[in-house]
Amino acid sequence: MNTDSQNDYVAALTDLHRGLERQGPGDSDFSRHILSHLPTLPPKPRIADLGCGSGAGALLLAQYYQSPVMAVDSSSVFIEELKARAKLAAGLEHLIIPIQGDMAELDWPVGSLDLLWSEGAAYNLGFEQALKIWRPLLANSAIAVISEMSWFADDVPEPARTYWQNAYPTMGTEAENLARARRSGFSLLSTHRLPAQAWWVNYYDPLRERMRQMEITPRIQSVIRETEEEMRLFAKFSDFYGYTFYVLQAA
């Protein structure tokens, strides 16, 4: 894909996800459960949400810890949506630090984070590459919670395997991703598979409604076709793949 085509694709994806609470699968209760089982963080922990989208995770983190959250996304559209949502969330606006930028090129000091959170965004860099870039940002024994598309089985049906090999060639099994994390300077504390129901209720169903309401331009038509194919495959094969949340500690 050339640069112009890539820019068109990203713009179409952004249009498709504009105004949605989430730009990917997730669930607030599920995230709170993970947070409740993390090791105790320092008082007023230093927190970042990388690839924050319009802020579902960042707002939850700010509410949960009552501490500032640096929320990074490359999309100005989603950063503006985050700012608007923070204003509407009672008592949270002053805790959200919106940053439009590249999560691969953060000029933050070494060891400046106690908790790094990232939902469904590491794949933009590749899981292992993301971990290697982000590891220096973490203080000793700091925590990273990162969700990543993962195979749940070895005997994946061919339609799902073919689709994801094309969409995300480096997608790994949970065991492969654990090995990648260890190579990148992390130890594993736990893993949590996002329930398939959360994909539908919090992401696919709102996305489907958005597709029904929006004007279908030629630019966005191919992205919609691809998204519909993704939904069809997930409906059939969600036992074989999905998002795993990797709870990691800087080793």
Image: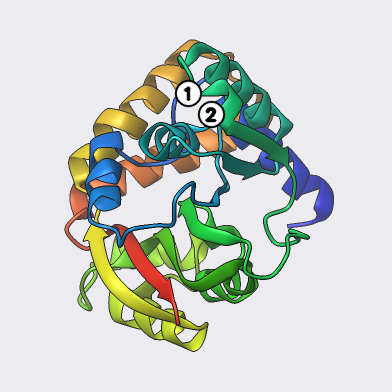
Disc 2 packing (10 Å; few <14; some 14–19; many ≥20): many
Q: Vertical placement of 250 versus 2: above or below?
A: below
Q: Which residue is mark 1?
A: 20
Q: Residue type at mark 1: give it.
A: Leu
Q: Residue type at mark 2: give it.
A: His
Q: Which residue is mark 2?
A: 17
Left or right: 138 as drawn, with respect to 7? left
Of the pair 193 and 169, the residue shown nearer to us:
193
Picture coordinates of residue 114, whole percent (x, y): 50, 60
Q: Quadrant of the C terminus?
A: bottom left
Give the quarter of the image for residue 80. Answer: top right
The local secondary structure at tag 1 comes to loop
Q: Vertical placement of 165 versus 101: above or below?
A: below
Residue at image point 60% right, 36% down: 13
Q: Quadrant of the N terminus?
A: bottom right
Residue at image point 73% right, 49% down: 6
Picture coordinates of residue 186, whole percent (x, y): 44, 79
Query: From mark 2 to mark 1, how far is it between C-alphas?
Result: 6 Å
Left or right: 187 as drawn, with respect to 218? left
Picture coordinates of residue 209, whole percent (x, y): 38, 18
